[in-house]
Amino acid sequence: MLSTALLFGILGTLAIAAKGTAARARMTTVEIRTTTKTITKKTIS
């Protein structure tokens, strides 16, 4: 299940690169980090 979180992270990073807007990229990075943490917590629990 951890690989799923990693996959979402990679996809998100690609999406950021595609958008190319610094402000949006920063926001998306935070969203990805939060989502990854949530997924990881659910997996561990």
Image (cartoon, grey):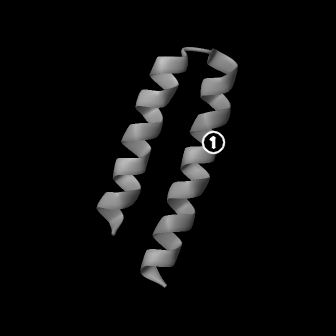
Local crowd at mark 1 within 10 Å, few (<14), some, or many (≥20)? few
The residue sitting at the left extreme is: 3
Residue 18: horizontal and vertical position, in percent? 47, 19
Q: Which residue is mark 1?
A: 30
Q: Give the secondary structure at mark 1.
A: helix
How many labels, in total?
1
- Residue 33, horizontal then vertical, whole percent: 55, 49
Query: Residue 35 at x, y = what percent?
Result: 57, 56
The quarter of the picture where residue 31 lies is: top right
Q: Quadrant of residue 19?
A: top right
Residue 36 relative to residue 4: left or right = right
Above or below — where is 42 with respect to 27?
below
Quarter of the view holding residue 43:
bottom left
Residue farthest to the bottom, as pictured: 45
| Relative to 21, residue 28 above or below | below
Which residue is found at the position 30% from the left and 59% from the top?
3
Question: Which residue shows up at 67% across the image and 34% down it?
Answer: 27
Left or right: residue 20 versus residue 13 is right
Position of the N terminus by quadrant: bottom left
The amino acid type, in three-letter code, at marker 1 is: Val
* Vertical comparison of 38 with 33: above or below: below
Residue at 57% x, 65% y is 38
